[in-house]
Image: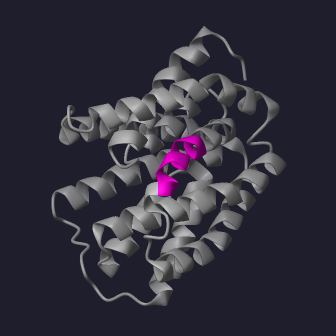
Amino acid sequence: MNFDLVFFAVAIPAVLFAGVAKGGFAGGGAFAATPILALFVSPGHAVGLMLPLLMMMDVATLRPYWGKWDRTAARLLLIGALPGLALGAAIYRFTNPAVFKLLIGAIAIGFVGFQVARTRGWLVLQGHRVGPRAGLLAGFGTGFTSFVANAGSPPAAVYLLLKGVTKTEFQATNVIVFWVVNLLKFIPFLGLGLATRQTILADVMLAPVAFLGAWLGIKAHHAVPEKLFFGLTYVLLVVTGGKLIWDALA
């Protein structure tokens, strides 16, 4: 990983965008930073670089939502996440970088499809009866997609919306689940070489950008139309996801 002008020209806007998403738009666009970075650095390093930055952004959200989560949902999601994280680690350990790049691209496109289906009402996720098995399955998907691309929110969101939790419970459960999942990911990331001395150095340099982005997100929450922000996010994800898939299959 070279800390040249190209790296910073890509990394600074990507991290800033992720911070804005975390700070003002419920984190919905934060995932976009990973596929953007994966176009310019190795997919593993892109994921490893973003993890500590996302953890920094999440710290501020812990206190306001502490103890307000749905305990049963959080427990099931976290238990299910463990084998999902293990599968993600195994795929990275035993496959070549092209497969990892393909997965990140596919998750990016799938994320957009999921969000568009929800927005247009094609996918109605409210108040259905779901049992423990659904929570464990959603947790598995959350752990796997979080490890591969820092993109674990769709499986968790599907389960929580089907369960019919309140708005506060939804946000608080996401906060605690992803805080724990990210902590669990960090040691395997070090062992697999996704988080290296170089990525940690990059995190130190980019930390002010992450906090600035989160602050700007808070300010932009009421000033920038949500539809405009997420529209831009989806365009970025489709373009970068498509490019990653193309490169992986080429």
Coloration mode: one colour
Q: Work out which residue is located at the far right of the displayed protein and give it.
A: 191
The answer to whether residue 79 is left or right of residue 193 is left
Q: Is residue 36 left or right of residue 190?
A: left
Task: Give the percent coordinates (x, y) of residue 226.
Answer: 22, 41
Q: Residue 216 location, x and y as percent?
A: 37, 29
Whether residue 15 is visible, yes or no, is no
Residue 148 horizontal side relative to residue 172, left or right: right
Q: Quadrant of the N terminus?
A: top right
Q: Quadrant of the C terminus?
A: top right
Residue visible at 72% across and 31% down?
Answer: 199
Figure check: 126 above or below 192: below
Residue 238 in the image, given as x and y percentages of width and height: 36, 39
Q: Quadrant of residue 131?
A: bottom left
Compared across the picture, whether 157 is left or right of 71 comes to left
How many numbered discs sit on the rendered protein?
Answer: 0
Q: In this rendering, does residue 7 appear at all? A: yes
Q: Position of residue 66 (x, y in %)?
A: 49, 64
Closest to the observer, 137 or 50:
50
Name which residue lies at 54% across and 65% down. Answer: 177
Q: Name the chief secondary structure element in magenta.
A: helix
Magenta range is: 54-63
Tell me, yes or no, whether the highlighted magenta stretch contains residue 58: yes
The residue at 44%/42% (across/down) is: 30
- Measured along the vertical axis of the image, is residue 58 above or below residue 210? below
